[in-house]
Amino acid sequence: MKDSNCIFCKIANGEIPSVTIYEDEDFRVFLDLGPAAKGHALIVPKEHYANLYELDDGLCSKVFLLAKKLAVHMTEALHCDGFNIMQNNGPVAGQTVFHFHLHLIPRYEGDTAGIQWNPGSASQEELTQLGELLRVR
Ligand code: 5GP
Ligand code: ZN
């Protein structure tokens, strides 16, 4: 399924040009226009899924294998010092393009990517209660 209003549908299917570093029948991987760091790329399925919740299970199982392959390849090519793999779901989580994608972000000592959060705190009681709520049965 494609969404005619979706920019990533158009890029993934070649209707809008992109700097593509990998392509197969399921995915296109292209460089981000607003890179967090040099080499920031996006793995994008050719079919439209708005987010992880909607993503097809078969593609879901393929996407992390592909992420590993590309992280290894990009690290060798760029000589980066580390690597982030990110995936945002919903505006509150930072998603701005509502077609599933995985960010591949090479990291360099002293870069300005700034991918971090402020560690909070939780009591043992809170953790235990949350554990009860979240345990998969
Ligand atoms: P999100 O915020 O949804 O997790 O990530 C969307 C990403 O897509 C951003 O990093 C943004 O820079 C990138 N992006 C948005 N529009 C385009 C585009 O037209 N072409 C490319 N190559 N990247 C885009
Ligand atoms: Zn789409």
Image: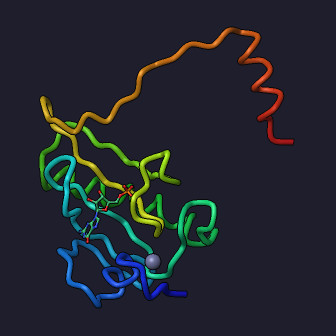
Out of 131 and 98, give the one closest to the viewer: 98
In this rendering, would 17 be left or right of 129? Answer: left
The x and y percentages for residue 85 are 38, 48
In this rendering, would 24 be left or right of 56? Answer: left
Render colour scheme: rainbow
Residue at image point 53% right, 69% down: 50
Picture quarter with ligand 2? bottom left
Residue at image point 81% right, 41% down: 136
For residue 42, what is the image quadrant? bottom left
In the image, is residue 45 above or below residue 72?
A: below
Residue at image point 76% right, 10% down: 125
Out of 49 and 95, give the one closest to the viewer: 95
The quadrant the N terminus occupies is bottom right
In the image, is residue 126 above or below residue 50?
A: above
Out of 56 and 66, give the one closest to the viewer: 56
The x and y percentages for residue 73 are 24, 58
